[in-house]
Amino acid sequence: MNNPLAFLISKTRSVMKCCALLSLYLSISVVAQAQPVDAPADQRANPAVLAHQNTLVPGLKRIGNRVYGAEFMGYSNFGFIEGDTGIIVVDAGWFPAPTANAVALLREHTTKPIIAVIYTHLHMDHYGGIQSILSEQGRDIPVYGPANWQATVAMIENVTQKATFRRAFMQMGIPLPEGLDGTVGNGIGPSPRLEASDALSYPPTIEVSEAMSLTIDGVALDIFPAEGDVPEHLWVWLPDDEVLFVGDAPPHGVFPAVETARFEMGRDPNKMMASVQKAIDLNPQAIIPGHSRILDQQADIRELMSLTRDTIQFLIDQVDRFYLSNRSVDDLLNTIELPPAVANHPQLQPYYHRWEWMMQQRFVKRSGFIDDWMDYLSHNAYDEAARLVPALGGRDTVIELATTNVTSDPQWAARLATYLLLTNPDDTEARQVRQQASIRFAQVTTSTNQRNYLLGLVAEESGDIDFDRMLRGPISVSLAKLDDAALLARLRSRLIAEKADDVDMTIRLTLDDSQAYDLQIINNILRVSWPDKERPITAAWTTSRETIIAVLTNQLSLAQALSNNRIVSNGSPLTSRRFASLFE
Ligand SMILES: [Zn+2]
């Protein structure tokens, strides 16, 4: 690039309403887990986190002559490349509104039409907003993307959809209000705000599974695999401009999530480390990441990428060291801290995930969860609580200990209160203390994810968040795509096995007056099969797919569906009700 980088930052809204109150607080004071805290009692969010979030100013940033990066305009970044006659879009944010806002800012500079789209990877936070572009544009433009669209959709819509979405929403603070009593962002950007979208309607039309060089509208582009958060992941490199779009391989500005406590079992730190090295080798003028700030200084890029690469290797090597010497994950967490060069670097703080979670997940992936005396001898938490509470002096002593620790050691206070709840779930005082301590811990932690999770748990427990209602729409859409047998099979994971000892019952169920299936409870499982004429049946049911979807989305139970005749039963009402009562 010949010109120095020009910035066109259009501030669309303040990330933090309270920012005027904050002095810029860049000295790093990471609150390690399980340490007493000395923050002021009225602190509502960690000041280092707030100061960091305050630097994440949303806007459209111009890089060189023809690249624009939409930075912090939504949960994830994306960008535009101006060609001779049109615009190439790289990624599209999670929800339509931030993407539409970015396009509106782009329109202050050019009216050229959008002529191509490239997805770096198929996480919904990087393509979910595309409808705001393609619904107007028409769908006849090429959409380049990784080759595993069907697998991605299948993964989203599988049996765990609700739990996966719930965890993601909790982590990112989606159900929480923005501000000091809710989410203060994600460390890597603002918390996403939920919008309806039909993200799955815009799959890639050109699948890229190996490196390709092409020219689109006069712009030379290299699109090539570079593994990051997911194995199927692409980078977009502009060799003439020396600008690199890296998606989630990896983000930076916080310590990157090389492992996650959530559900990314495919994530591989070795592959991510190789991608970081590739970024160093390309020596770009600018990197536009999927999250965190755009890097537009080569010295900055080299420093951050080198430190990131070395820290990923540190994680890999030290986990292996402890595993190889039969030392436990707790020993690891108790011994290993981030290298000082990272621990003291303002751009690599663990404002997103906790570093401890990454080490723990890496360790579990390497070695499972059996590793030392405590694991071979483990009680489950209920057994442990039943022994610990008396050993600590009984319920009243423990609640007093918990209460006095809420401010100074909230993590311990919340755990003490949890031991009480494990011995008696009706202990409302313990529940209140746990909520207070969890809120306090959320107010002091440096991890925005940990804050979001804890505040989310409190809100969920208080009935302020209802994931059934929030997720019913997308889950109903997914269920509607299943064939009858697959739809009925979703009842399997709702069988209350502990109530089904020695049960052998079969319902012959006819769906929408067409095909019949046998639903047999036997050996504490539900088997869904074609009707077996030899098998004695308990009752015959007739119902609709709509009713089964309503049951699977917790709008009513099977028992309620029976009593209000959405399921018509032919047979003994008593045994029909007994069968229905064995499902959540
Ligand atoms: Zn992402």
Image: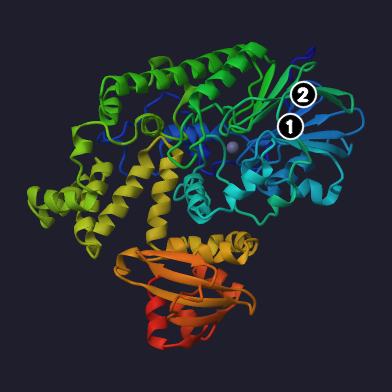
Q: CA distance from mark 1 to mark 2?
A: 8 Å
Q: Residues within 10 Å of mark 1 (few under 14, many from 20)?
A: many
Res 224 seen here: yes
Instruction: Name the quadrant containing residue 545.
Output: bottom right
Seen from the viewer's position, the closer of residues 105 and 448 is 448
- Judged left or right of residue 121, residue 178 is left
Q: Quadrant of ligand 1?
A: top right
In the displayed orientation, state which residue is furthest to the right: 85
Q: Residues within 10 Å of mark 2 (few under 14, many from 20)?
A: few
Q: Residue at x 9, y 54 (%)?
A: 394
Residue 264 at x, y percent in the picture: 50, 38
What is the basis of the colouring in this image? rainbow
* Dot 1: element: loop
Residue ID for mark 1:
208
Where is 317 relative to 524, above or below? above
Q: Residue at x 48, y 71 (%)?
A: 519
Where is 407 relative to 57, above or below? below
Going by the numbered disc 2, the residue's amino acid type is: Met
Res 343 seen here: no
- Judged left or right of residue 261, residue 529 is right
Where is 286 relative to 561, above or below? above
* Dot 2: element: strand
Residue 441 at x, y percent in the picture: 33, 43
Residue ID for mark 2:
212
CB under 8 Å between callouts 1 and 2? yes
- Image quadrant containing the N terminus: top right
Q: Residue at x 35, y 64 (%)?
A: 524
Seen from the viewer's position, the closer of residues 118 and 40 is 118
